[in-house]
Amino acid sequence: MTFLRKGILVSGGQVIGILLGLIVGILYSRILGPEGMGQYHLLRSTSLIIVTMAALGIGNANIYFLNNRKTPIVEVTTNALKSSMVMGALLAVLTVTIFLAFPGYFGRIPVPVVIFFATGVAALLGNALLRQILTAQMAVRRMVTVSLTEVSVGLVGGTVLGVLGWLAPETALIVLASGYWAGFILLLVYLRPHIELFRSFNWKLFGNMLVYGLKLAAASVLYLLCLEISVMLLRYLKPDRFDDIGLYSRAVAIAGLVALVPRMLGPLLFAKWSGVTGQARTQQVEMALRMSVTYGIMAAIPVVLLGKYLIWFLYGVEFLAAQEALRILAPALIFLTIFNVCSNLLAGDGRAVITVYILAGTLVVLGVTAFLLVPVFGIAGAALAVLCGNAFTGLVNLAVCRRLYGLNLLNCLFVHRGDLAYIRQAMRRQ
């Protein structure tokens, strides 16, 4: 299987995962309503932030030490598993403490549910530390299978509980944790040949991975915070109910469909970058930007015009108030397509630290604008903050890449006839 075909398979798996997640969101939303969905979303997003920060970039460091340092896979896998066991136990305790210590923010949840969910968060951390070993092996089918297992458990479990009339925020958390455990167990099955529990823990390797991983973790943490800070501030600044978060999260879910087409085309657009330099690479980047922006706009327009009907069809009349945020979020996500192209370019050229600085600035823009706008405009204010933050991210990335690589901005906006021919030829070669 060629590298390009593997990239298409991974992107296709991600798209399928997003669509399955959308179905799960539809099911949960129709049963839980805005209030229940808001609480569930807040707890889930908080757990993702905690895990991303706790992973310390070690998962991505595994790729470097396996492929560049040629560290034996048994040593890397065993070390990562033992690290996840200790770090996961500590993270579970931290999760229980946070959720139970702030009932006014997270809402009241039964203690047994919090404890079980915390173990699921620990399993998710193990997944974060170990999954990239499959990436280093280019075991793309196994990578996709692990990812789809987690969301499939959510779909099946949610459906069963919904039919029985037992689906509530707390039972939804149990299903979510079960999905985390299912993905982690499957991952261990795949990596079992490379695990030797009686092998001594390599502290030197752990320290080297920690030093290297922390450099990679900053971008991931900042990116996730940029995605979720509007939700966090919406709850903090509008603490009376979870309804606003429930409505806002559904608008985000529908607007996220704007990014599906660029994500599917990503491997086709980025495949030649590693083999070209100079003007040839500049032309490839300009084509990637043209394709991403154009298709992003084409996807955003129907979402903006038909948003009311999409919300009604997917989530029901209880969520119709989300349309005011959706009209703003759909075009806002177009700027993320620019970020996707530019960040891939900078990372491939050894300039990933620039992305970290831009994301840090984006987080400040998002935080300040949300703090000012949410108390006045509610979920529309949160969406406006995202629009401001995404515009900052996209335009600054574009300006940086223009200066570094000599991009012609006019060549980055509208699709050329030859671009479509390139995509067709690339797909025929697979």
Image (spheres, rainbow, N blue to C red):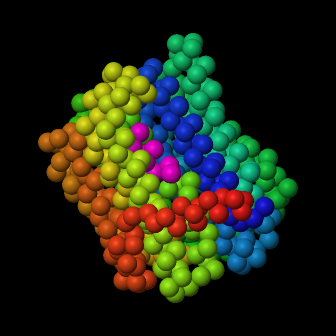
In the image, 256 versus 350, the foreground residue is 256
222 or 212: nearer the viewer: 222
Q: Could you tell me residue 206's position as x and y percent?
A: 65, 69
What residue appears at the point 55 percent right and 76 percent down from the top-left corner? Answer: 348
> Horizontal and vertical percent for residue 425?
65, 63
Q: Is residue 187 above or below residue 413?
A: above
**Residue 396 pos. (x, y %):** 32, 71
Counting labels gives 0
Residue 306 x %, y %: 34, 35
Q: Which residue is the extreme one toward the left?
A: 376
Q: Is residue 285 left or right of residue 370?
A: right
Name the residue: 38% across, 53% down: 297
Screen quadrant of the C terminus: bottom right
* Residue 360 drawn in magenta: no
In terms of image quadrants, where is residue 290? bottom left
Of 108 and 181, the residue lying toward us = 181
* Of 323 and 180, the residue lying toward us: 323
Q: Main secondary structure of the magenta part?
A: helix
Residue 38 can be seen, yes or no: no
Residue 12 visible somewhere in the drawing:
yes
Question: Residue at the spot x=49%, y=64% of the render?
Answer: 417
Viewed as shown, does residue 141 lie left or right of 33? Answer: right
Magenta-tinted stretch? 254-261
Position of the N terminus by quadrant: bottom right
